[in-house]
Image (tube, coloured by chain):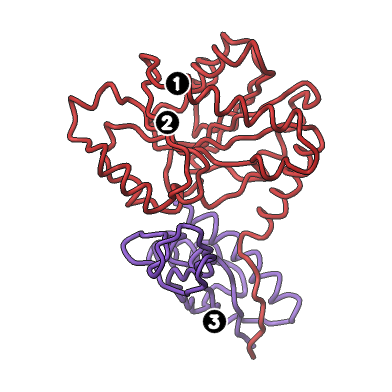
Amino acid sequence: MHEIRIAEDLSSIVVEAAKREKLLNVTRVNICFGQLVQIVPEIFEIAFREAVRNTPASKALLDIEILNVEMKCMKCGSDFLLIDNQFACNLCLSDDIKIIHGKELFIKSIEGE
Amino acid sequence: MEIKIMKNILDRNQHRAEEVRKMLLSKKLLMVNIISSPGAGKTTLLERTCEVLGPKFRIGVIEGDITTDRDAQRLKKYNIPIVVINTEGGCHLDSHSIFKVLDSFDLDNLDVLFVENVGNLICPSQFDLGENFKIAVVSTTEGDDKPEKYPMLFREARAVILNKIDLIPYTNFNLTDFKSDLKMINARVSLFEVSCTRGDGLEMWFDWIGEKIKSIIFPMEGSQAKNL
């Protein structure tokens, strides 16, 4: 259900940007979610539709890119993708790792006229 | 025409959370965000914690509840400041709601503020409240698969309280599997195996959280961040 609140915040950002850029219609909203954020795209789409109702973005297409969880080992420097929830280096097995991608929740751009 | 934005969608929440964090730091006050599913035992954990740590530290509680104040009623007997945030159906607390209620507390006369988040394992873990750290509470009756199903919370949590260990014989909960899944997700997390109703294992939790509170009240120069 956090999809609703995130969609509302997204709508505010889109409406603000459209106003600033003097767009009458927003045709596309490009966003990016990391896999760890556990957003269900179908639910998010419904929440977004509700959030942008009666705004210049009411007919905008929503493009959601989902990013895999990518990590870096702080011990041996290897970069690797998360497999089976194993938050440890797949080479040296160190648990001293940094999550590089996978926690994103950001808006990339909007398109409009 | 395409307009680049590249902005965190929860930017406003994040900024407010940083404000809360700064305010708490200036007041030498620890804030702990307690997250679990409904019925895992957050309020019972707080009851036991208030009983034992209440005489040693000045405790405040923020109760996140969808509609009622029943959890807050249970804590009233400890004579501590409690503020209820009713989310009116919302599945999590956010930093704006926390910021608004901080005024209701005498922050100069508190050592620790426990935030009991709304019962949910996904949504609350996305919203930074400005806390020092998150605690995940999970009970054996929910099954041993929770870390695997909700990795974000268990990855972010500083400690995990496994509650209702006295009920393991009546469930199919596999402690070995639970521990091995948790270790894969967060090898450095502190795990406390407890029964909040019977009292098993709680001493270690009291010591641990007591040390965290002390490290805020009496920070060794420059080491506060490390201790937390």
- On whether disc 3 and disc 1 are found on a single subunit, the reply is no
How far across and down, in percent of the image, does residue A63 sit? 48, 78
Observer-nearest of B33 and B168 = B168
Residue located 51% across and 38% down the image: B135
Q: Which mark is residue A112?
A: none
Front-lying residue, A105 or A14: A105
Residue sitting at x 60%, y 35%:
B32
Look at mark 1 in the image and give the residue it sits on: B202
The purple-coloured chain is labelled A
Q: Is residue B46 left or right of residue A22?
A: left
The residue shown at (53%, 62%) is A7
The subunit letter for the residue under badge 3 reads A
**Element type where label 1 sits in the image:** helix
Badge 2 element: strand
- Mark 2 falls within which chain? B
Q: Badge 1 sits on which subunit?
A: B
The residue type indicated by label 1 comes to Leu
Residue B72, image x, y percentages: 54, 20
Query: Quadrant location of residue B171?
Result: top left
In this figure, which residue is indicated by the disc labeled 2? B192
Mark 3, Cα crowd under 10 Å, few <14 / some 14-19 / many 20+, is some
- Report how far apart the C-alphas of labels 2 and 3 lie in the structure: 48 Å
| Colour for chain B in the figure | red
Residue nearer the viewer, B81 or B204: B204
- Residue A108 visible at all: yes
How crowded pointer 2 is (Cα within 10 Å; few <14, some 14-19, many 20+) is rated as some
Decide: marks 3, 1 in contact (CB < 8 A)?
no
Residue A108 pos. (x, y %): 59, 77
Quadrant where the C terminus of chain A is found in the figure: bottom right
What residue sits right under mark 3 in the picture?
A28
